[in-house]
Image: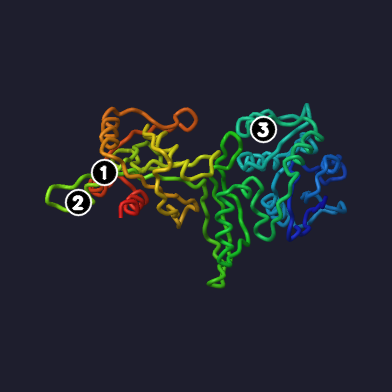
Amino acid sequence: MQVIYAGEAAPESFSKSIFLAGPTPRQSPALAIESWRPKMLEALEKAGYDGVVFVPESRDGVWLTDYMGQIEWEQSSMNMSDIVLMWVPREMHNMPALTTNIEFGMLVNSGKLFYGRPDGSPHTAYLDYMYHKITHSYPHKNIDELAQEVSDILKEGISRTGGERCIPRHIWTTKHFQDWLKQLKAVGNRLDDAKVLWNFLLKNNFPFCFSIWVNVWVEAEQRHKENEIIVSRTDISSICAYYKGEGRVGEAEDWLDTEILLVREFRSPNRTIDGFVHELPSGSSFGNDNPREVAAQELEEETGISISPNRFVEAKSRQLAGTFSTHKATLFTVELTKMEITAAKMNAGLGEVHGNNVTDSEQTYLEVRTVHEILESNLCDWTTVGMIMEAIR
């Protein structure tokens, strides 16, 4: 275990890291009480933890005179930690933990806060409530148990260097982050600094979506790009199911008459005139990494139409909004028979609700529109229009 005290430089590389957050005894000799952090370090060592621990206290008992420097060191070290371990033995006269309350509020949604406090610690009811509400876990009341939990989580280390150290473990291990980082490095670029701004965690604490400020060294331009964020979520599969029609007698088939299956759904960001998005059936599955199978699942879930994945033709995989989000869509196409398009139109006319309304509050409605109607209606976004053009070209 490598302990880094206040003001000391972080290792250039490490595989696991913890920051010990919580109240610090006041420095006045008349008010001095024992710090809880040495006991936590003993508990971590006993639990078998062998990574870096950031301790916001001085190694030799002499505190930094640069107060702002202390704050900056703490913020940088917390940002660089896989887990912020917060123990709150609040004592209102000598250790009121007012700063701890602020840090708790900043971190409780981060996905890396683990919190505990001894029985009888005053004014912690609100912390207990918010911690359980957001993380679905209860605070520990024993230092050894808290140390053991975080040690078990960090049992397998993940080596990171430089700016990569600022990506916490729970985000680092996601496929959507690794796919972005792999492509970044493949062209010689480098992540030199980062800060997770927010993440949207599912109930199993999986970071479905997150936003990170990044400082990237751009090798081709020999400069840093440091005024942008990345937004990342799981990649999706999209399916363009279409019917070309039989053409008119004596005339060439008109591609604008091609009929496309769409889904209509309320999505909060939409700016359409009817208040709904109109898009291809699309989505991601956390338990299935096969894009073709995911496409078939999404088609059936969002439209009620079941088609064998063997009929799907893979088109291309592209980013949907390359200036903003890292995620990609893998596009599949399937040509429908006359019987299938007739049945789809009948189903669309019934106005039945599809989608996963139980866990995702998803309500979708099947629509059948020609390419001409899609282009003229201005209801589909550019991403959807682009995928349709790719599918039928």
Mark toward the start of the polypeptide (1 vs 3)? 3
Q: Secondary structure at mark 1?
A: strand
Quadrant in the picture for residue 13: bottom right
Percent position (x, y) of residue 387?
36, 51
> Label 1 to label 2, Cα distance in Å?
13 Å
Q: Nearer the viewer, mark 1 or mark 2?
A: 2
Q: Nearer the viewer, mark 1 or mark 3?
A: 1
Give the vertical position of 117 relative to 71 (above or below): above
> Total of numbered circles in the picture?
3
Q: Tell which of 112 and 185 is nearer to you.
A: 185
> Label 3 to label 2, Cα distance in Å?
66 Å
For residue 205, side relative to residue 358 (left or right): right
Badge 3: how crowded within 10 Å, few (<14), some, or many (20+)?
some
Q: Tell which of 158 and 105 is nearer to you.
A: 158
The amino acid on which the numbered mark 3 sits, given as a three-letter code, is Leu
Give the vertical position of 236 relative to 144 (above or below): below
Percent position (x, y) of residue 328?
47, 51
Pointer 3 residue: 127
Give the vertical position of 144 relative to 79 (above or below): above
Q: What residue is drawn where x is 19% and y is 51%?
A: 253
Percent position (x, y) of residue 251?
14, 52
For residue 66, side relative to residue 256 (left or right): right
Badge 2: how crowded within 10 Å, few (<14), some, or many (20+)?
some
Pointer 1 residue: 259
Q: Nearer the viewer, mark 3 or mark 2?
A: 2
Q: Secondary structure at mark 3?
A: helix
Q: What residue is drawn where x is 52% and y is 49%?
A: 232
